[in-house]
Image (cartoon, grey):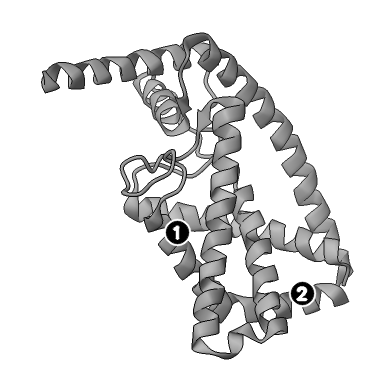
Amino acid sequence: MNFILTLAYLFFVGSISGWVLELFFRKWFSSSNPEHSPYLPIYGFGLCALYLLALLGRETGLDGSIQGRVLLFLGMAVSMTLIEYIGGLLLLKGAKIRLWDYSNCRGNIQGLICPLFSFFWALLGAGYYFLIHPHILTALAWLSENLAFSFVIGFFFGVFLVDMALSAHWASRVKAFADANGVIVKVENLKAHIQAAQERASTRVHFFFAFRSERPLVEHLREAHEAMEKIRQKHKNDAV
């Protein structure tokens, strides 16, 4: 099967599966919800990387020993951590947006990556290798015999590109506010503020449209920023 189509299929599967994984992770370990779109591109790129590394391990015979597999899983952890760091850094520097924050974790770098989550990525890589990769190969074999399914992949990328354009427009508005006020916008704080405002106004909170509101986005940004400033000032006064 065409190599580009293979990666497109993996990106499609990884993006959606990653969103589901985040859904369960945040249900048990966090009170927040994953991003509103039912896919996360970082996991799409991650699955492509894990697939390529697993193939490389097989081609080089690295997976033929315990030490080789450990090295392979470390490589998977490094690749996932690198993808996470690059994605977070692009948003942080280019749009003044912070999607996640590991600042409270030991050994973190800019709050974007940390040893704890790199360890989780290593476990995820091992889980992928033993539990998922054989099924991925079977699925790819099926796809090569049923290329009509590529229409679904094409539809996904069509929706994905439209959503990316809308997200870019939203991010540009957030960046304009961030630049004007010299701040970094934490998406989780903004989302929580908008949802709280909707609940106070007895407005339905949409699961897939967490940032939709009848009020202008800049008003929510300003109020969320003022609320965070009050919290920081309170902590500063308490420390004194």
Q: Which residue is found at the position 88% from the left and 65% from the top?
A: 148
Instruction: Find numbered disc 1 in the image and state the secondary structure of the residue it sits on.
Output: helix
Choose between 101 and 173: the one closer to the eye. Answer: 101
**Number of other residues with Cα within 10 Å of mark 1, as a class: few under 14, some 14 to 19, many 20 or more:** many
- Residue at 66 percent of width and 87 percent of height: 61
How many numbered discs sit on the rendered protein?
2
User: What is the x, y in percent for residue 155?
Assistant: 80, 50
Q: Can residue 216 be seen here?
A: no
Going 25% across and 20% down the picture, which residue do you hit?
Answer: 231
Q: Name the residue at the bottom extreme.
A: 64
Image position, residue 62 (x, y; %) = 62, 83
Residue 213 relative to residue 11: left or right: left
Instruction: Say if residue 71 shows up in the picture.
Output: yes
In this rendering, the label closer to the viewer, 2 or 1: 1
Measured from the top left, where is residue 87 in percent x and y? 59, 43
- The amino acid beneath tag 1 is Ser
Q: CA distance from mark 2 to mark 1?
A: 28 Å
Mark toward the start of the polypeptide (2 vs 1): 1
In the rendered view, would you say 197 is above or below 222?
Answer: below
- The x and y percentages for residue 198 are 42, 23
- Which residue in the protein does label 1 denote? 118
Q: Residue at x 34, y 55 (%)?
A: 28
Going by the numbered disc 2, the residue's amino acid type is: Leu
Dot 2: within a 10 Å radius of its alpha carbon, few (fewer than 14), some, or many (20 or more) residues?
some
Q: Which residue is the site of mark 2?
A: 140
Q: Nearer the viewer, residue 213 or 110?
A: 110
What secondary structure is marked by label 2?
helix
